[in-house]
Image (cartoon, rainbow, N blue to C red):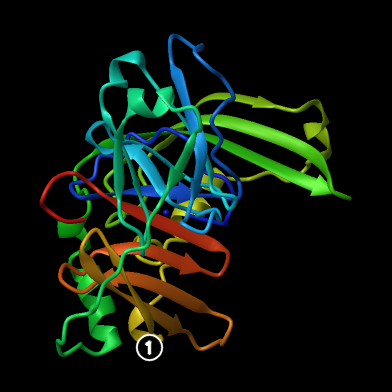
Amino acid sequence: MVYITRAQNDNIFNTILKNLFPLLIITLFFLTPTIGQSQEGKVEIDGIILDETNFPVPYAAVGIVEKYLGTSSTEDGEFSMLVTKSELQDSLSISCLGYNTIKIKVEDYLNQEEKKIILVESVFEMDEIKLLNPLEYVLNAQKRLKENTISTPHKIEMLYRRAATEGGRSKFLVENYIKIRDRGPAYPLGIVEVAEARKSADYRIWKRVQWTHSINHMANGNPLRPSEKQPNLKKFTWKKIGDSSYEGEDVLILEGTGKKQWNKIKLYIGIDTYSVYRIEKQKALYIYQKHQTESYI
């Protein structure tokens, strides 16, 4: 299920979703520390995800879904996440819209000489069915959000990194280890706790005072999550602009335009379940990965 501008998202999500769990992709980014077998016995899993023509696959979902651990590939197809030694026998799942999902034992992947994953494009033909009006898919997706996503209290843990640049050089850097008590995208974001924080020496140049953590703004950027800034999707003009597939389900790509032509939202919605697998809003990207259970979002 994913707030925010397209940048790096390498973190551990303890986001318990019935069927889909979100990978938040943020320009104020999530970044996993570079480490091997350190940090209290944790092991780093990293690599690159490519397609059959050797091009990077950006924003692919990577995770151990049974343990609610996940991240996503960067624009260059690279990914990194931490696991414990007890999770080496679990399966690593790599999925992306339009590609066949791959699963491999964590230990087997770490033993590979090349840390490379090749995704094969899924070949599908949309069934001859009568499609609904695009707006109906959007409204059904909203209506089923509680059913299709986690709606019970759970904890999200992430490493939040924010930086500014000037003349191509970093101006300041802030890192927060954040814990969030949440109920999923069908509800407003829960309580945010900054458990640990650090900042660069040049942070003093940043004078702006924020009354709330930026992660709240990121959450409110999700057009499906209730907030005072949530757009009225009924007032958007919706049209089908393409189709894809995700783990055997046909997916419609719908684009909505608001009163202002620049205000566009793109939703990737499953035809059978009305699950939302991806959201694009200006520079923000939200990705949802299917969970191992048979129920939906």
Q: Position of residue 15 (x, y in %)?
A: 31, 39
**Relative to 100, residue 29 above or below:** above
Q: Nearer the viewer, residue 249 or 213?
A: 249
Horizontally, residue 6 falls left or right of residue 208, namely left
The three-letter code of the residue at mark 1 reads Lys
**Relative to 106, residue 63 above or below:** below
Tell how many labels: 1
Q: Position of residue 103 (x, y in %)?
A: 28, 40
Q: Quadrant of the N terminus?
A: bottom left
Horizontally, residue 74 falls left or right of residue 248, namely right
Horizontally, residue 77 falls left or right of residue 253, namely right
Hey, which quadrant is residue 256 in on the image?
bottom left
Q: Is residue 228 visible?
A: no
User: Which residue is situated farthest in the right direction here?
Assistant: 167
Q: Which residue is mark 1?
A: 239
Residue at 47%, 55% in the rendered image? 51
Residue at 56%, 70% in the rendered image? 282
Around disc 1, counting alpha carbons within 10 Å, would you say few (fewer than 14), some (14 to 19), or many (20 or more)? some
Q: Position of residue 5 (x, y in %)?
A: 57, 57
Q: Position of residue 213 (x, y in %)?
A: 54, 43
Hey, which quadrant is residue 2 in on the image?
bottom left
Q: Is residue 98 visible?
A: yes
- Mark 1, secondary structure of its residue: strand
Horizontally, residue 36 falls left or right of residue 230, namely right
User: Which residue is situated farthest in the left direction here?
Assistant: 294
Residue at 20%, 88% in the rendered image? 132
Residue at 42%, 24% in the rendered image? 110
Q: Nearer the viewer, residue 74 or 150?
A: 74
Q: Quadrant of the C terminus?
A: bottom left
**Relative to 203, residue 240 above or below:** below
